Image (cartoon, helix red, strand yellow):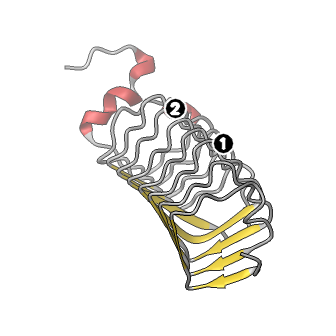
């Protein structure tokens, strides 16, 4: 893999070592069943790429650029996204494991999380305007000083956060989710 630019290629079952991806750019590529756990993402760009059933658990994804990227069935347990390139970026998750991931202080407008496990995810100080949380488990997820305006939590569950410490104007919640939003008031809801 000595080339630096890849277009419309498919990568299957590859275990990437620490330096294999450094300084490379991928456009419209598909990665299936790949292991990125020990990979260094130094100056890597993924544009309109798809990742299917890949393992990123505890990977250091610093200085990676993600534009138009979909992650399907991937494991991101304990991954810190805070150092990703934030210039013209967009990425989404479907059927992913995002437990203990960190999205601290990121602009994640219109981000989509579909059918994901998101236990103890950190969204502190993030901008999740118009984000979609579709059928996600958000148990112990941290929302503090987070912009959740027009975010959709309608089908998600186990979320609990302080409405006074977040921007929630026009956010969508199901009646069943109100208990987690009113928890600080110690109300008895029947």
**Which corner quadrant holds the N terminus?**
bottom right
User: Which residue shows up at 70% across the image and 56% down it?
Assistant: 17
Q: Which of marks 1 and 2 is nearer the N terminus?
A: 2
139 sits to left or right of 38 = left
* 95 relative to 103 in the view: left or right: left
Decide: is 78 above or below 171: above
Q: What element carries label 2?
A: loop
Where 117 sits versus 3, above or below? above
Contact flag, marks 1 and 2 (Cβ < 8 Å): no
Question: Residue at 45% across / 19% down in the picture?
Answer: 184
The image shows residue 94 at horizontal and vertical percentages of 40, 58
Q: Position of residue 21 (x, y in %)?
A: 73, 66
Total label count?
2
Question: Foreground mark, 1 or 2?
Answer: 2
Residue placed furthest toward the left: 190
Considering depth in this image, is 165 or 19 the residue closer to the camera?
19
Residue at x 45% of width, y 53% of height: 151
Reading the image, the residue beneath label 1 is 125
Quarter of the image holding residue 90? bottom right
Q: Dot 2: within a 10 Å radius of its alpha carbon, few (fewer than 14), some, or many (20 or more) residues? A: many
Q: Residues within 10 Å of mark 1 (few under 14, many from 20)?
A: some
Q: Which of 153 and 45 is in front in this view?
A: 45
Q: Is 1 or 67 nearer to us in this picture?
A: 1
Q: Residue 45: x, y in percent?
A: 70, 71
Tell me the residue at 60%/58% (across/down). Answer: 15
**Residue closest to the eye, 138 or 161:** 138
Q: Quadrant of the C terminus?
A: top left
Q: Is residue 79 left or right of residue 17?
A: left
Residue that numbered label 2 is attached to: 120
Indicate left or right for 39 with 190 as reference: right
Kind of element beneath mark 1:
loop
């Amino acid at each position: 893999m000595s080339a630096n630019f890849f277009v419309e290629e498919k990568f299957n079952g590859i275990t990437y070592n620490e330096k294999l991806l450094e300084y490379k750019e991928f456009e419209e590529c598909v990665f299936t069943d790949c292991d990125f756990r020990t990979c260094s993402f130094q100056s890597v760009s993924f544009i309109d790429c798809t990742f299917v059933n890949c393992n990123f658990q505890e990977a250091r994804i610093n200085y990676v650029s993600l534009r138009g990227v979909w992650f399907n069935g991937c494991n991101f347990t304990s991954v810190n996204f805070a150092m990703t390139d934030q210039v013209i970026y967009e990425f989404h998750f479907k059927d992913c494991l995002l437990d203990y991931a960190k999205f601290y202080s990121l602009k994640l407008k219109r981000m989509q999380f579909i059918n994901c496990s998101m236990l103890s995810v950190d969204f502190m100080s993030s901008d999740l305007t118009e984000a979609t949380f579709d059928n996600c488990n958000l148990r112990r997820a941290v929302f503090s000083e987070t912009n959740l305006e027009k975010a959709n939590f309608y089908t998600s569950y186990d979320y609990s956060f302080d409405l006074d410490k977040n921007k929630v104007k026009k956010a969508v919640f199901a009646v069943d989710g109100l208990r987690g939003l009113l928890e600080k008031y110690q109300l008895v809801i029947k």
